[in-house]
């Protein structure tokens, strides 16, 4: 009787091992077939990640060829970083930012009634065309000033003015730029 029970148990184990072996073999075959698909999906995902990174960089790049006057200044995060960097001069930073906003709004309100195209931006990279080809201004790598104005006309070289100007100063520079751009 003990022999019969042992043979039965051994038989059940053999059948179980055989059954699970077949299942495992079929699973392994499926995995083997999926490997090329997985490699392809991995490569496609890497390509998508690269495209997303490029797209993100493009989102922070502005082409100004369609604008005549562009005012650039730090975004909120950059301004907060400036406050940390120049904490002893933070009052002056607030005043400079306020002056910039005041004067460009006066100019914006006045010039927006003309056919000139104006934009106020915080994009990091500003792309513009010159007779030598396309050039870029990276606001964060600019050592002259965080604020500025670009006077632009497709018939002339763009003129970049760094710093904060009064509305009268902006009108004078714009007048000079347009006078010299023929």
Image (spheres, helix red, strand yellow):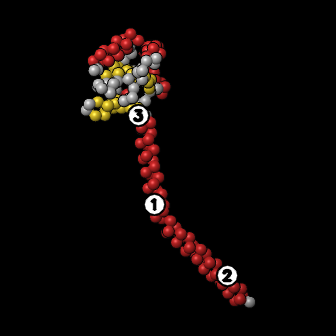
> Closer to the observer: label 2 or label 3?
3
Q: Is 54 displayed left or right of 5 in the figure? A: left
Q: Position of residue 52 (x, y in %)?
A: 45, 44
Q: Which residue is mark 1?
A: 39
Q: Which residue is mark 3?
A: 61
Would you say the residues marked 1 and 3 are in contact, meaning their CB atoms lie under 8 Å apart?
no
Q: Position of residue 54 (x, y in %)?
A: 41, 42
Q: Is 8 displayed left or right of 137 in the figure? A: right
Closer to the camera, 158 or 81? 158
Would you say the residues marked 2 and 3 are in contact, meaning their CB atoms lie under 8 Å apart?
no
Closer to the camera, 87 or 123? 123
Query: In which quadrant of the rendered image does the C terminus lie?
Result: top left
Q: Is residue 146 visible in this depiction of the protein? A: no
- Gap in angstroms between the C-alphas marked 1 and 3: 33 Å
Relative to 33, residue 63 above or below: above
Q: Position of residue 70 (x, y in %)?
A: 40, 23
> Closer to the observer: label 1 or label 3?
3
Q: Residues within 10 Å of mark 1 (few under 14, many from 20)?
A: few
Q: Residues within 10 Å of mark 2 (few under 14, many from 20)?
A: few
**Image mark for residue 12:** 2
- At x 31%, y 22%, the residue is 159
- Gap in angstroms between the C-alphas marked 2 and 1: 40 Å
Closer to the camera, 140 or 119? 119
């Amino acid at each position: 009787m003990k022999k019969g029970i042992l043979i039965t148990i051994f038989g059940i184990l053999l059948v179980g091992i055989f059954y699970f072996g077949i299942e495992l073999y079929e699973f392994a075959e499926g995995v083997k077939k999926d490997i090329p698909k997985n490699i392809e999906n991995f490569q496609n995902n890497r390509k998508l990640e690269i495209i997303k990174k490029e797209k993100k960089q493009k989102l922070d790049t502005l082409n100004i060829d369609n604008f005549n006057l562009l005012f650039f200044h730090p975004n909120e995060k950059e301004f907060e970083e400036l406050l940390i960097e120049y904490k002893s001069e933070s009052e002056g930073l607030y005043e400079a930012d306020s002056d910039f906003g005041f004067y460009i709004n006066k100019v914006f309100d006045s010039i927006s009634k003309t056919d000139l195209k104006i934009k106020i931006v915080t994009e990091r990279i500003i792309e513009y065309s010159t007779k030598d080809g396309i050039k870029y201004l990276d606001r964060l790598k600019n050592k002259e000033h965080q604020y500025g104005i670009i006077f632009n006309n497709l018939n002339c070289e763009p003129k970049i003015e760094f710093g904060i100007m009064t509305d009268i100063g902006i009108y004078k520079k714009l007048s000079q730029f347009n006078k010299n751009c023929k």
